[in-house]
Image: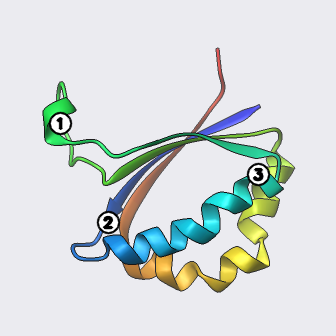
Amino acid sequence: MIYFTQLIYILDGQEQTFLEFEDVAIPLIAKYNGKLLLRYRPTPDNIIEKNMEMPYEIHLVEFEKEEDVAAFFRDEERKKFLHLKEQSIKSTWLIKGSKI
């Protein structure tokens, strides 16, 4: 299994646009042998230590293999809505890892 943690930073006022993109992208994960394990929106009151900007959302996603990840990113339906992602996201951190 391959795991990705994504910290997502949204441009001010673009939350709804981002959610429109997620409405398309998230269901596609399962099509490529993936699972969205965690989707979390942190709030200032649940941050213990802060040495960086707080992300809008944090995702933890699992895929069975690299080929599945690549196929997800190449998905034609997802590509049709990438303009929403580009319009709404300021930046992301994508951290690849494995369960130990």
Please, is residue 75 above or below residue 65 in the view? below
Q: Which mark is residue 77?
A: none
Direction from residue 42 to residue 39 in the image, left or right: right
Residues at discs 1 and 2 in contact (Cβ within 8 Å): no
Residue at 83% across, 41% down: 65
Sequence order check, earlier mark of 3 and 1: 3
Say what amino acid the circle numbered 2 marks: Ile
Q: CA distance from mark 3 to mark 1?
A: 34 Å
Say what amino acid the circle numbered 1 marks: Asn
For mark 3, give the secondary structure: helix
What percent of the width, then of the height, locates residue 16? 36, 74
In this view, the residue in front, 32 or 70, is 32
Q: Which residue is mark 2?
A: 10
Say what amino acid the circle numbered 3 marks: Ala
Please, is residue 15 above or below residue 99 in the view? below
Q: Which residue is mark 3?
A: 30
Direction from residue 84 to residue 40 in the image, left or right: left
Direction from residue 4 to residue 10 in the image, left or right: left
Please, is residue 93 above or below residue 60 in the view? below
Q: Which mark is residue 51?
A: 1
Residue occupying the far top of the picture: 100
What percent of the width, then of the height, locates residue 89? 38, 70
Q: CA distance from mark 3 to mark 2?
A: 24 Å
Marks 3 and 2: which is nearer the front? Answer: 3
